[in-house]
């Protein structure tokens, strides 16, 4: 391997590089080190960061290599060449880095009570603020090639996803803001995300210069459900209580008539549908009496059983499902539910570090007294 007399890195044509490991490790005192604007050169000896150089031209000597120079004098008696790794670090700010949630956030919309599958994506800008801290976190995975910006996004993808999901969920559930009305909050959510993400990136020597959420969206199927609710609500407001109830009754009979196996279909086929329609029109201003259910469906096999029965006559499963109350909003839920379908709060039991099982809303452990995370 050739002995270095001039050390310089001109960058890569793609400009996507973040860290570049110089291919030659034989260093000679008296060589010229050239560091370009927006760069830093870092000398690493036996896996440890020794000396850092910012933009400029340097003639290497034990005088400007205070840390590495000690090893040279101690181990090599001041003779050169000596082995050391050189890493060029890109200090320029990168503003066009893109991120997105890897999977959907499942939430109940607080206004329309529809389960939504929400995703988000956006853009962030970063730069290296602490060179030693950044290299220490990456030096084991650098290999022999350049590290690109996108690799850093992949490295922090878990942190980004967790923080973004938590922030969006908090705004929709706790502030009761519908996902359909969250767009005006994008700037506020972006600022909150920047504040929460900054400490996690600073630990690794990175500074988030900018962070933007460009879109919070959900699939067309979710949109169709809410549009149907809006259509029904508009019809109710235009037609009024009684006429809307009559319309819905006609819709039910129409659906039954289209079902050739249904009882109502048999009535219509026998010429009774027209008479029933007239009777309903004559009573359109009266209150529609609710039809009392006389059967109960088995939650396991879907068999219809007589109302008041405790166990299914087909599979023997219990028909009365135990209920629990949400610790956050007090809503009544089926036993075994993991999340509240009213407020979205987690119903999972907590486990203390001492091993004790705690209630989901416990703030302190009843066994060891340790404070629990909210």
Image (cartoon, rainbow, N blue to C red):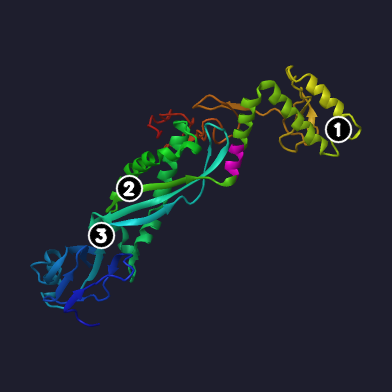
Q: State which region is magenta.
A: 221-227
Q: Residue at the spot x=79%, y=30% of the render?
A: 305
Q: In this view, does 351 lie to the left or right of 201?
A: right
Which residue is label 1 attached to? Answer: 263
Q: Which label belongs to residue 182? A: none
Q: Residue at the spot x=62%, y=34% of the render?
A: 231
**Does the magenta portion include 374?**
no
Q: Which of 93 and 315 is in front in this view?
A: 93
User: Helix or strand or loop: what does disc 1 sit on?
Assistant: helix
Q: Residue at the spot x=55%, y=41% of the render?
A: 116
Q: Which of 91 and 280 is in front in this view?
A: 280
Q: Is residue 108 positioned above or below 212 on the image?
A: above
Disc 3/disc 1 C-alpha distance (Å): 75 Å
Quarter of the view holding residue 240 = top right
Q: In this view, does 311 lie to the left or right of 96?
A: right
Residue situated furthest right in the rendering: 270
Mark 2 or 3, which is nearer the eye?
Answer: 3
Can residue 367 be seen here?
Answer: yes
Q: Which label belongs to residue 200? A: 2
Magenta span main SS: helix
User: Helix or strand or loop: what does disc 3 sit on?
Assistant: loop
Give the crowd class for mark 3: few <14, some 14-19, many >=20 residues within 10 Å.
few
Can residue 312 be seen here?
Answer: no
Residue 96 x, y percent position in the rendering: 35, 57
Residue 205 x, y percent position in the rendering: 27, 54
Q: Earlier in the sequence, mark 2 or mark 3?
A: 3
């Amino acid at each position: 391997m050739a002995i270095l007399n001039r050390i310089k890195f001109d960058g890569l044509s793609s400009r996507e590089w973040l860290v570049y490991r110089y291919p030659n490790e034989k260093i000679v005192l008296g060589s010229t080190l050239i560091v370009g604007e927006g760069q830093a050169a870092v000398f690493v000896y036996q896996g440890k960061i020794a000396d850092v150089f910012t933009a400029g031209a340097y003639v290497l000597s034990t005088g400007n290599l205070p840390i590495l120079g000690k090893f040279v004098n101690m181990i090599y008696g001041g003779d050169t060449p000596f082995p050391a790794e050189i890493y060029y670090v890109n200090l320029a700010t990168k503003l066009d880095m893109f991120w997105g949630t890897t999977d959907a956030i499942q939430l109940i919309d607080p206004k329309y009570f529809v389960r939504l599958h929400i995703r988000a994506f956006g853009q962030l800008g970063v730069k290296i603020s602490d060179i030693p801290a950044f290299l220490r976190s990456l030096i084991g995975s650098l290999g022999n090639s350049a590290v690109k910006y996108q690799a850093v996004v992949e490295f922090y993808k878990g942190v980004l996803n967790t923080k973004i999901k938590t922030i969006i969920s908090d705004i929709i559930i706790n502030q009761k803001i519908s996902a359909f009305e969250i767009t005006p909050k994008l700037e506020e959510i972006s600022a909150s995300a920047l504040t929460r993400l900054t400490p996690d990136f600073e630990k690794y020597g990175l500074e988030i210069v900018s962070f933007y959420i460009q879109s919070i969206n959900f699939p067309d199927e979710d949109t169709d459900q809410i549009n149907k609710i809006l259509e029904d609500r508009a019809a109710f407001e235009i037609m009024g209580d009684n006429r809307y109830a009559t319309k819905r009754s006609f819709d039910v009979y129409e659906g039954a008539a289209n079902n050739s196996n249904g009882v109502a279909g048999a009535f219509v086929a026998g010429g009774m549908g027209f008479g029933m329609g007239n009777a309903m029109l004559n009573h359109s201003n009266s209150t529609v009496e609710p039809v009392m259910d006389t059967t109960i469906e088995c939650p396991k096999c879907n068999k219809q059983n007589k109302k008041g029965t405790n166990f299914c006559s087909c599979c023997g499963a219990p028909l009365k499902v135990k209920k629990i109350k949400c610790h956050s909003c007090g809503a009544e839920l089926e036993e075994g539910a993991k999340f509240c379908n009213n407020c979205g709060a987690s119903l999972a039991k907590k486990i203390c570090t001492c091993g004790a099982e705690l209630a989901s809303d416990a703030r302190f452990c009843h066994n060891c007294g340790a404070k629990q995370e909210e």
